[in-house]
Image (cartoon, rainbow, N blue to C red):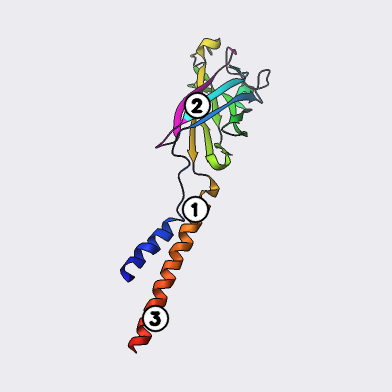
């Protein structure tokens, strides 16, 4: 009986381990919308398309992640980088989900103009801040990260004009176990109680055996 106690203790300890988010794939659907877009100036004037846009993707085992999901194209119609374009302008992307449950989050960043070699080479750029983490309850924590980008690269003639010279912004999605997954489920609690009961009974029998032997 006693040689089985370590195994019982190990089983009880394992009952506290974090459970996987899901054994099957998790489907996400919703939309995004680009806000705080500097389309008039001062600062580098930028445009995006499509805006808003739909979101539909699936996160499956074993990684529960997907990289490089194309969202929208960003570009500028300005011919050259002016002095005010070097100052960063805010840009934000709001995410709203309807499945697997309702959820929302936001990723913010800045857009600005760049010039090098005394202005001979010019371009626009977008740089994003930290990722957004959305809690979907029993489905887990969804992390959204956006890709930085350089767009409308030009030369001493200035930025190339037009939408076709823009760059696509992509997103990386990853799903982690829910915060509540470390709390044992009812069935797990029953197993734990049974395990503790067996361990207690074994200890009592051992004490009784020692008392009789004495």
Callout 1 crowding tier (Cα within 10 Å): few <14, some 14–19, many ≥20: few
Rounded to the nearest whole Å, what is the CA distance between mark 2 and mark 3?
60 Å
**Quadrant occupied by the N terminus:** bottom left
Q: SS at mark 2?
A: strand
Q: Position of residue 88 (x, y in %)?
A: 61, 28
Callout 2 crowding tier (Cα within 10 Å): few <14, some 14–19, many ≥20: some
Q: Position of residue 30 (x, y in %)?
A: 59, 26
Extent of the magenta region: 59-82
**Front-lying residue, 136 or 116:** 136
Mark 2 against mark 3, which lies toward the viewer?
A: 3
Rounded to the nearest whole Å, what is the CA distance between mark 3 and mark 1?
31 Å
200 drawn magenta: no
Q: SS at mark 3?
A: helix
- Residue at image position (48%, 36%) is 174
Question: Taking 199 as reference, is 115 above or below it?
Answer: above
Q: Which residue is mark 1?
A: 187
Find residue 9 and report its image quarter: bottom left
Q: Position of residue 59 (x, y in %)?
A: 46, 32
Find residue 40 and report its image quarter: top right
Rounded to the nearest whole Å, what is the CA distance between mark 2 and mark 1?
32 Å
Q: Which residue is mark 2?
A: 57
Disc 3 or 1, which lies upstream in sequence? 1
Disc 2 or 3, which lies upstream in sequence? 2
What is the residue that sits farthest to the bottom in this orientation? 214
**Front-lying residue, 131 or 27:** 27
Q: Position of residue 209 (x, y in %)?
A: 35, 82
**Front-lying residue, 122 or 111:** 111
Q: Which mark is residue 207?
A: 3
């Amino acid at each position: 009986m006693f040689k089985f106690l370590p195994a019982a203790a190990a089983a009880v300890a394992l009952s506290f381990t974090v459970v996987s988010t899901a054994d099957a794939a998790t489907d996400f659907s919703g939309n995004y919308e680009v806000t705080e877009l500097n389309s008039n100036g001062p600062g580098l004037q930028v445009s995006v398309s499509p805006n808003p846009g739909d979101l539909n993707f699936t996160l499956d085992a074993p990684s529960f992640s997907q990289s490089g999901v194309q969202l929208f194209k960003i570009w500028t119609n300005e011919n050259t980088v002016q002095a005010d374009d070097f100052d960063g302008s805010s840009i934000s992307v709001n995410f709203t989900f309807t499945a697997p449950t309702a959820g929302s989050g936001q990723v913010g960043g800045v857009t600005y103009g760049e010039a090098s070699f005394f202005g001979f080479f010019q371009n626009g750029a977008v740089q994003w801040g930290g990722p957004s983490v959305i809690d979907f309850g029993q489905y887990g924590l969804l992390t959204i990260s956006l890709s930085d980008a350089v767009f409308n690269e030009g030369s001493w003639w200035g930025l190339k004009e037009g939408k076709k010279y823009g760059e696509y912004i992509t997103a990386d999605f990853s799903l982690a176990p829910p915060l509540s997954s470390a709390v044992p489920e009812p069935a797990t609690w029953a197993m734990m109680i049974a395990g503790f009961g067996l361990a207690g009974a074994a200890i009592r029998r051992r004490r009784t055996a020692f008392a009789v032997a004495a």
